[in-house]
Amino acid sequence: MKNYLTHDEWCIIEEGFHPEYNEITESIMSLGNGRMGQRGNFEEGYSGKTLQGNYVAGVYFPDKTRVGWWKNGYPNYFAKVINAANWLGVQIELEDEKLDLANCQVHHFQRTLNMKEGWLSRSFVAMLPSGKQVGVTAKRFCSLTYDEGAVIRYCIKPLNFDGKLTIIPYIDGTISNRDSNYDQKFWQEIHRETGFAEGYLHLTTIPNPYNVPQFEVVTGQKFDLYRDGAPFHFKALPVKQDRYVSSRIQLDVIAGEEIALVKYACNISDQNHSREELLSIAKNYLQKMSDKGYEALLKEQIQAWDQKWQHMDIVIEGDVAAQQAIRFNLFQLSQTYTGEDDRLNIGPKGFTGEKYGGVTYWDTEAYCIPFYLSTAEPKVARNLLIYRWKQLGKAIENAEKLGFKDGAALYPMVTMNGEECHNEWEITFEEIHRNGAIAYAIHDYVRYTGDRAYLGEYGFEVLLGIARFWSQRITWSEERQKFVMLGVTGPNEYENNVNNNWYTNYIACWCLRYVLEVAEELKSTDGERYQALVQQLHLAEETEFARFQQIIDQMHYPASEELGIFLQQDNYLDKENILVSDLRPEDRPLNQKWSWDRILRSPFIKQADVLQGLYFFEEEFSEEVIRRNYDYYEPRTVHESSLSPCVHGILASGLNRPEKAYEMYLRTSRLDLDDYNNDTEDGLHITSMAGTWMSIVKGFGGLRIKDGQLHLSPTCPQQWQGYSFNIRFRDNLLDIKVSADGGVIVENREGDALNVWVNGEERAIAAVEKA
């Protein structure tokens, strides 16, 4: 656990340079705007420990799966978001020395991520080996108003010398991913072009054998220079090399004189524009940004973030670490996904690193959708669901590769385009509970928004495909005289190839129940649409629905009557009865210290498994059942998945375990800021950040939807003086304030009057007064 960042309510501040943590800080200081993102790399380059990262939404490469053997149905490739051309570069040379903080004495270093206004700044004084000293201040942001563009203001001041200063703004397309097979580079050049104070690089991804389209991106730069705040005439020597463009500017400078470079950059992708027009669009785009100017663009950025914070901010009184953490999580979520494009989704690392390939996991449905339901317009969550509906055909193909038929759909564990591209067999073939999370998300969306029309438009098709998969995947056991689910991996990935994972069995049967309920609803509310779906989907109602009901009635659920708990899977109790508290500190985290064989044989749980089901379906279980299972499984859980602490925290709140709930909140919210699991350098845990929001709103706030109405049962951690959060519910925007003494104020900021249940009592909330 690291503790080198200053606690501040609105900023992430690194006081003093910590090169040993630089890759961690680069992840934390990442910026994005939904269309593109950039790790917190240095503009002038850095030869020390660094992970260069610039990503363009929707652009990826189907990298060949690296395994020494093959199985039928195994994916051919692992899709990964790839490093796009580095638009950030501003090389600095002082006489014949290159500015590189790895080779300098660094003083007065500060790096600040301003979350309230959406920008990253850096300042320092560097003494080069020759003794020359320079002061640098830099500020940049990925624009929310020009969401394919970014701006840098880079200022340099010689402090103790007069001489030659060379500034080289550049775009470098020779980049590669750290995890590339054999250092493979994924880009080849179509065109490069330079002009006075501008340059453009048109790249395409290299060909691939998997019928995945190649992507094209034009990355451009345009810049202005200022001397002590005033524009001046300068000469720029254009430089063009393979996959590289720059301008070389050499100036005579004197001590104390500040030179400022304002660099406008863009990534124009064929995902949003025709390929023939990419270059001209890039030129026009940068011209518009340049005409508007740095100060006006920054002002728009601040205003855009102010609008976001008005709708999603959570205020915590009396606990700066907790306040900083929740705003950091909200900030990163909001700059990763905006909901404007239903072709896009949320990768576990967002725009902050390469790990997990930037692909879509079940994290979106299980963790992110609740956040967007409450903090954004309904279309945002709807677009996340439509993303899966559009990929239903691919999900059916994925199932067919494994031998399923007749419209059975297995959604991929990880994907870019709907095709499975995960390269670990125990996940690809066995972690099939992801299907259930997608069905649950449809239920969650309809319950929260009241948009029941979605079921007939899109939802039933997806639900039926998933139900058909479960119907075929389940096996009848003559021995048990029950249906069973063999050879699966549950949410606890520290056990593979188990039989009858309780959570998987339960959510499978819940999916079957839900599709039957939706079918009945559609019959009664929109019979014409339902009959059209019956024909379209070749639904044999009588036989298929009878099979679904039979499975529901006769499914095996492993349990221990003696302990009064659901068993994570058959034979779980054969494992050693030891707890996380029995582990030595030097054994943690297990996934970095133990062999996989040892982990698989241990009783330790990576993340909520049985408890994941009790969190999803808590209304179907008594508090006593939840308590017994929580008390058994939480002490055996190492929380080495970023998705784990939030579920445990929400359940702890419901069980009136305030200290455990607070512990889990801090763990999930400061997971990256404090580098709990020693992996922040790979990128941030974007999808689990939605769990941080859930820890407060669903956990401490007790938000639930029951019978179409909003219920709250707030508690306040004793470490806080109070807290407040905003939620959208149907046509209302509500502000909920909770005080340390348990008082609750619900204010309606938008919309008509509505009733809200607070601590079991129905309260009328007045409409917003019309001006």
Image: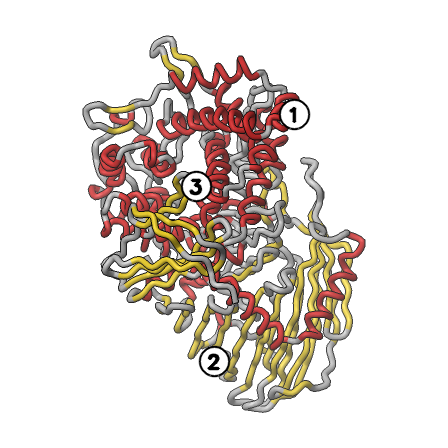
Circle 2 packing at 10 Å, graded few (<14), some (14-19), many (20+), is many
Q: Position of residue 356 (x, y in %)?
A: 50, 45
Camera-nearest residue between 555 and 394: 555
Residue that numbered label 1 is attached to? 532
Q: Is residue 315 above or below residue 468?
A: below
Q: Position of residue 667 (x, y in %)?
A: 32, 53
Question: Quarter of the image holding residue 522?
Answer: top right
Q: Is residue 200 above or below residue 586?
A: below
Q: Quadrant of the N terminus?
A: bottom left
Residue that numbered label 2 is attached to? 125
Query: What is the CA distance from the residue labelled 1 to the residue labelled 3?
Result: 28 Å
Residue found at the very far right of the displayed protein: 276
Q: Secondary structure at mark 2?
A: strand
**Residue drawn at the location 49% of the way across and 73% of the way down:** 122
Amino acid beneath label 3: Gly
- Marks 1/3 in contact by CB < 8 Å: the verdict is no
Sooner in the amino-acid sequence: mark 3 or mark 2: 2
Sooner in the amino-acid sequence: mark 2 or mark 1: 2
Sooner in the amino-acid sequence: mark 1 or mark 3: 1
Amino acid beneath label 2: Val
Query: What is the CA distance from the residue labelled 2 to the residue labelled 1?
Result: 70 Å
Query: What is the CA distance from the residue labelled 3 to the residue labelled 2?
Result: 59 Å
Camera-nearest residue between 559 and 750: 750
Mark drawn on residue 708:
3
Q: Secondary structure at mark 1?
A: helix
Q: Is residue 536 visible?
A: yes
**Residue drawn at the location 61% of the way across and 35% of the way down:** 457
**Residue drawn at the location 36% of the way across and 42% of the way down:** 591
Circle 1 packing at 10 Å, graded few (<14), some (14-19), many (20+), is few
Q: State the colouring used for the structure image.
A: secondary structure
